[in-house]
Amino acid sequence: MTLCGKVFTEYEIEASATKFYNIFRKQLQNIPNISPEVHGARVIEGDWESIGSVIQWKYTIDGREESAREKIETIDDENKVITYSHFDGEVSENYKSLKGTLEVMDEEYGALVRWSFEYEKLKEDITGAFPNSYLDLVLEVTKAVDAHLVKE
């Protein structure tokens, strides 16, 4: 097993790429009201939508309630890409670095959402969530956001 790596998943959604991307770009504060896996969020530094802003998240992963902070690292509105670094809480107990990237691409009907996580573990045998568990979490959030947007 390796300490460093990258994992990703893709999911086709019914909502438009613009609407979906806008939730993560301009309405992050609504995620706890949309997705049952996310129990809370609050701004620690900055605001909900600017590069450098830090948000504290509470969520369920692998059946455990955890919390971590997320810093918005990059925003590319033209290509609908946002990169976040994750730290503190259980993340910092297991990872030297954990960076997540959201990409949303237009398709003929709906959109394609791609999530990826680049990581460096502190040691091979971590006690917290594995990188694929973070993919499972964001996939559930993606499904919930898509369902919310489709029913609007």
Image (cartoon, rainbow, N blue to C red):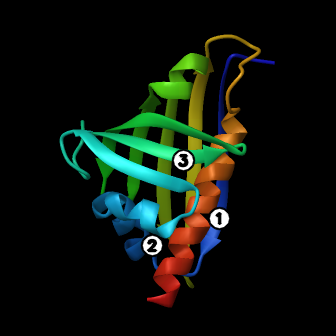
Q: Nearer the viewer, residue 67 or 47?
A: 67
> Is residue 1 rendered to the left or right of residue 68?
right
Q: Which residue is mark 3?
A: 59
- Name the residue rendered at 58%, 56% in the picture: 37
Numbered badge on residue 23: none
> Is residue 71 rendered to the left or right of residue 120?
left
Mark 2 nearby-residue class (10 Å; few <14, some 14–19, many ≥20): many
- Image position, residue 81 (x, y; %): 40, 53
Task: Mark 1 or mark 3: name the one nearer the start of the chain.
Answer: 1
Badge 3 marks a residue whose secondary structure is: strand
Q: Is residue 142 visible?
A: yes
Mark 1 nearby-residue class (10 Å; few <14, some 14–19, many ≥20): few
Real-space CA distance between mark 1 and mark 2, rounded to the nearest whole angstrom = 12 Å
Real-space CA distance between mark 1 and mark 3, rounded to the nearest whole angstrom = 21 Å
Look at label 1 and name its amino acid.
Tyr
Q: Quadrant of the C terminus?
A: bottom left
Q: Which residue is mark 1?
A: 11
Badge 2 marks a residue whose secondary structure is: helix
Look at the picture and state if 107 lies above or below 63.
below
Real-space CA distance between mark 2 and mark 3, rounded to the nearest whole angstrom = 25 Å
Q: Which residue is mark 2?
A: 17
Look at label 2 and name its amino acid.
Ala
Quadrant for residue 108, please give it: bottom right
Callouts 1 and 2 close, C-beta under 8 Å: no
Badge 1 marks a residue whose secondary structure is: strand
Look at the picture and state if 100 lies above or below 103.
above
Q: Is residue 107 visible?
A: no
Mark 3 nearby-residue class (10 Å; few <14, some 14–19, many ≥20): some
Name the residue furthest top: 123
Name the residue furthest bottom: 152
Q: Quadrant of the N terminus?
A: top right
